[in-house]
Amino acid sequence: MTGHGSAAIEVEGLYKSYRGLEVLKGIDLSVPRGSVLGLLGPNGAGKTTTVRILSTLLRADRGRVLVAGFDAVSQARDVRGRIGLSGQYAAVDEELTGRENLVMLGRLLHLGMRQARHRATELLGRFDLLEAADRPARTYSGGMRRRLDLASTLVGRPEVIFLDEPTTGLDPASRMALWSTVEALTAEGVTVLLTTQYLEEADALADRISVIADGRVVAEGTPDELKRKVGGERLEITVADPADLDTAHELLRPLATGEIFRDDRRGVLGLQPVEGMATVAAVATQLSEQGLVVSDFAHRRPSLDDVFLSLTGSPSS
């Protein structure tokens, strides 16, 4: 690896405003080499702005950004030579074939024609696109275009890759295939910064997660660390008749630690049990004795959805 230091990405005090509106308000990030950082936040939180600054497409008002050991402002060319970027929409030339797209990028990156063709074939195979390699990209499905777009970010063998909501709109099979690719890249020592609207994606891929809200990092840690911040395991009860929700709520109040989560639309009550499994048994008994019919009864750990809602006050999508 070129550059300096153990972190592939270092961000200190990042600020950015648009027309007097402050979008970033002092973002700090540190991403170790060969790891995945999941950047989460509601729409408008500043995720894409952060990625654009880190990839040298936008200049911050204040702050310090090092990528692969190089300053994103004074050494922007060095940064660009070491990164790959895949945005929310596949950036491919639809009139060119898949192979021609990759060869063209190789030539733009100053690879010789022979080397560019070899790299294109290698990547087409890696992303299961060899059979479609010589078809125009406009004939590709959405998943194929996304795979071609990701392949294009790897032509120059980047040290750091920025993936800005890379699986938006993909079917589950295509998403799983892209997840496997990200895992293979980090195993090779590539560093990935991932923004995503799918919390299970961050849970599956990210070594650490930073949650952004209102232009600030409001929490940072491993997925398990963030889940523990929300609280312990939770009991969820779905009543068959929403009209019984008030009765169930009052009945369960003495058995809960803290406030009871309530979703009137779905008829769901969520509570943190006072005495673990003993409380679970007591809840089942109380509901049965009152003749309340329950359609679902689940004891589960906090999810990243719970973390997201707790930290940002917004649902994940």
Image (tube, rainbow, N blue to C red):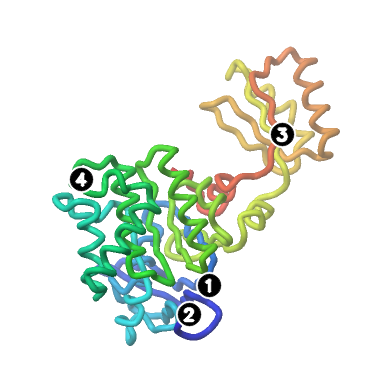
The residue positioned farthest toward the front in the image shown:
114
Which residue is more in the foreground, 16 or 247? 16
The residue shown at (24%, 76%) is 110
How crowded pointer 1 is (Cα within 10 Å; few <14, some 14-19, many 20+) is rated as many
Amino acid tagged 1: Arg
How crowded pointer 3 is (Cα within 10 Å; few <14, some 14-19, many 20+) is rated as some
Residue 113, image x, y percentages: 22, 69
Callout 4–callout 1 Cβ contact below 8 Å: no
Secondary structure at numbered mark 3: strand
Secondary structure at numbered mark 1: loop
Q: Earlier in the sequence, mark 3 or mark 4?
A: 4
Front label number (4 vs 2): 4
CA distance for labels 4 and 2: 36 Å
- Report which residue position mark 2 lands on: 1
Q: Earlier in the sequence, mark 4 or mark 1?
A: 1
Q: Quadrant of residue 277?
A: top right
Q: Earlier in the sequence, mark 3 or mark 2?
A: 2
Q: Is residue 140 left or right of residue 299?
A: left
Q: Is residue 168 above or below residue 61?
A: above
CA distance for labels 3 and 1: 37 Å
Q: Is residue 149 left or right of residue 231?
A: left
Callout 3–callout 1 Cβ contact below 8 Å: no
Amino acid tagged 2: Met
- Report which residue position mark 1 lands on: 33
